[in-house]
Image (tube, grey):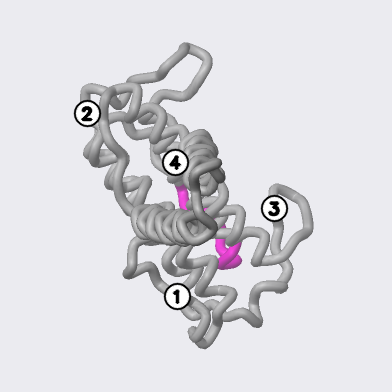
Amino acid sequence: MHYFTKNFFCTIRNSIEVLTRPSSSQSTRVGAWRIVLAVVALNLTLASLASAQIAPDMPNPIKAPNPLTTTISIFRSNMQDKIMKAAETMPDSKYSYRPTKEVRSFAEILNHVGDISYYLCANAKNEARPVIAAEKNSKTEIIAYLKGAFEYCDGAYSGFTDAHLNAPADFWGHNTNKMFILTQLANHDALHYGNLVTYLRLNDLTPSGGWF
């Protein structure tokens, strides 16, 4: 996406330079109209690009009773939606896939996401971490495990308000606050969703899901 955006804007810039470059036979009025057309074309293209990247039904937390907590929850829900759809997209036969022997397999990444979800959300809820069964291997088992982990995390957000964000929390022995735990949850999901997207692409599969 970074390289696409960079090249896209280079193309727009070059197009504007061509449209606005004066020539010896060009009148001032014609030159002005060329500049206007270039600006209009740029605005239309930018609007098209924005609408292609962000869905119109994306939730807006600004007017929510607890806008900060709602913002964190929206990001977390978006990432978990993407992860679940990635898990559903990859065929069962490819769950053992790994690009190189040094990295986790697709199945191991999903198990890891579920494990950390339980750990962080138990921390946010001030509960003992639920007992985690042996690592799952099949697609059906792993999707069920992820669904259970994400539903457990729903409870960490249920009734949670902005006033709780600075409440004390523990992060692997380090003193921190609840906001750190909840933002780290979404951050961890996003980190490993990037892995899952790569694995899907390497298998000629297209990821989908989420608002952006």
* Relative height, residue 160 to residue 143 (above, below): below
* 3D distance between C-alphas at marks 2 and 4: 18 Å
Which residue does the numbered mark 3 point to in the structure image? 171
Element at badge 1? loop
Which is nearer the N-term, disc 3 or disc 1? Answer: 1
Element at badge 2? helix
Which of 2 and 65 lies nearest the eye of the viewer? Answer: 2
* 3D distance between C-alphas at marks 3 and 1: 29 Å
Q: Are marks 3 and 1 in contact (CB under 8 Å)?
A: no
As shown in the figure, which amino acid type bears the numbered disc 1? Answer: Asn
Which of 90 and 55 lies nearest the eye of the viewer? Answer: 55
Magenta stretch? Answer: 124-131
Q: Which mark is residue 60?
A: 1
Q: Are marks 2 and 1 in contact (CB under 8 Å)?
A: no
Q: Are marks 4 and 3 in contact (CB under 8 Å)?
A: no
- Report whether residue 211 is seen: no
Which is nearer the N-term, disc 4 or disc 3? Answer: 3
* 3D distance between C-alphas at marks 1 and 4: 23 Å
Q: Is residue 94 left or right of residue 191?
A: left
Going 37% across and 27% down the picture, which residue do you hit? 199
Question: What percent of the width, then of the height, locates residue 205?
Answer: 26, 30
As shown in the figure, which amino acid type bears the numbered disc 4? Answer: Tyr
Which is nearer the N-term, disc 1 or disc 4? Answer: 1
Which residue does the numbered mark 2 point to in the structure image? 92
In the image, is residue 206 part of the stretch drawn in magenta? no
2 vs 4, front mark:
4
Which residue does the numbered mark 4 point to in the structure image? 193
